[in-house]
Amino acid sequence: MLKNFRDGLIHAVGYDADIQKKYCNAKFDRSLDASGMCIVPGLVDGHTHPVWAGDRVHEFAMKLAGATYMEVHAAGGGINFTVDHTRKASEEQLLKDFEERLRRMLRCGTTLVECKSGYGLDVETEVKMLQVMENAKKNVPIDISSTFCGAHSVPKGKTADEAADDVINVQLARIKALMDSGELELDSIDVFCEKGVYDVEQTRRILHAGKEMGLLINFHGEELNYLGSAQMGAELGATAISHLEEVSDEGIAAMATSNTVAVVLPTTAYILRLRAPPVRKMIDGGVPVALGSDFNPNAFCLSMPLVMHLACVNFRMTMNEALCAATLNAAASVGKSHSHGSLEVGKVGDMLVINAPRWEHLIYQLGGQDHVIKHVIRRGDVVHSN
Ligand SMILES: N=CN[C@@H](CCC(=O)O)C(=O)O
């Protein structure tokens, strides 16, 4: 099998490779039966915030007692709590914690992960987070797609308009210089478009500025309140929008027309007790649906197999759809479906050997799914064995 992975790329496949259809939720039911084991592509995590300091375990009790996400923020917790700690943390400490999280993701089968900044909200700390991502790329055998999310929250002491100006004129300007000099490699720009955070027009301004710099648009929209951000994102040609619990029928139609990927996040809906996004309507309406773990101090889950399980039970996705969403469609959400997300000639040789007679065991087992993963192969190399 491994002879097919010289240079880390797939040169030939030993079975019928017609398993997924680009940008759609196609069937994926022809797993390879190799000595009682199955093979699936390496998993792609389409939305995470894994670089930060300051866990928020204390907030969990508030949420269990019924506090909403915005009530936790108003009480001094939430994103701004993590921002305070991340600003104080050294780059070395952030890198050490981040690399440990990446290694745990790898053991759960993730071979490509989208990673957002967003706990700095000022130019120094945002750049520090992005540099941590850059350094981790050299040390951990996992592919990282970096996203600048300087507009993740409105920092203390600024209005949203002032903060949007700072993101555009100060943060993006510095990031562009670092990208031009080759010190940073970024794929996407993100904004938390939400009532009480950035409104649709502020979000549009920031995303437009990022697009002008060549970044893909991949932002948080329609999570807690309906704002019409899906329509705005579609107008701007967004590559992806995530959350979408409150997306409207018009938003779904607009996203289908612009071929914008919907990145849905079952752990977040679960922990915040939000209603499920209308995944069935999105799939039936022609929107490509992807999955992300949304690993962050609020939704503390690194395991894509667990996310796929929740997607099937709580979002009523089929197991085929969940696998496609956690591989090819998640790769499309970061503009990497040409190289990642399926076992096709010319793509990277990322795959999982599943220690079970059917690949569905990856989803079937609730918790402990890493036990089902026998090997994680990244670019043709076995990088983890269980
Ligand atoms: N909703 C906004 N951002 C994150 C949560 C960040 C946090 O609570 O620290 C998310 O994607 O779920």
Image (cartoon, rainbow, N blue to C red):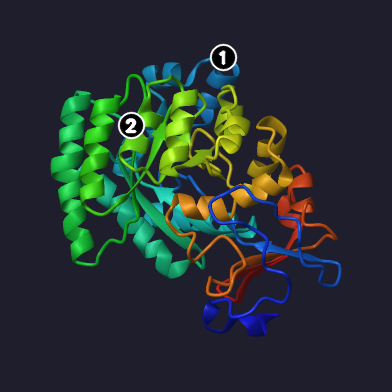
Disc 1 residue: CB within 8 Å of ligand 1: no
Position of residue 326 measured from the top left corner of the image (x, y, whole percent): 60, 50
Asked if residue 157 can be seen in this view, the reply is: no
CA gap between label 1 and label 2 equals 32 Å
Q: Residues within 10 Å of mark 1 (few under 14, many from 20)?
A: few
- Residue at 38 percent across and 35 percent down: it is 82
The amino acid marked with disc number 1 is Gly
- Residue at 45 percent across and 44 percent down: it is 259
Q: Quadrant of the N terminus?
A: bottom right
Assign a secondary structure to mark 1: loop
Q: Quadrant of the C terminus?
A: bottom right
Position of residue 346 measured from the top left corner of the image (x, y, whole percent): 53, 74
- Residue at 52 percent across and 42 percent down: it is 295
Figure check: 44 above or below 265: below
Disc marking residue 66? 1
Figure check: 115 above or below 301: below
The amino acid marked with disc number 2 is Met
Q: Residues within 10 Å of mark 2 (few under 14, many from 20)?
A: some
Mark closer to the observer (1, 2): 2
Task: Classify residue 237 by image quadrant.
Answer: top left
Disc marking residue 232? 2
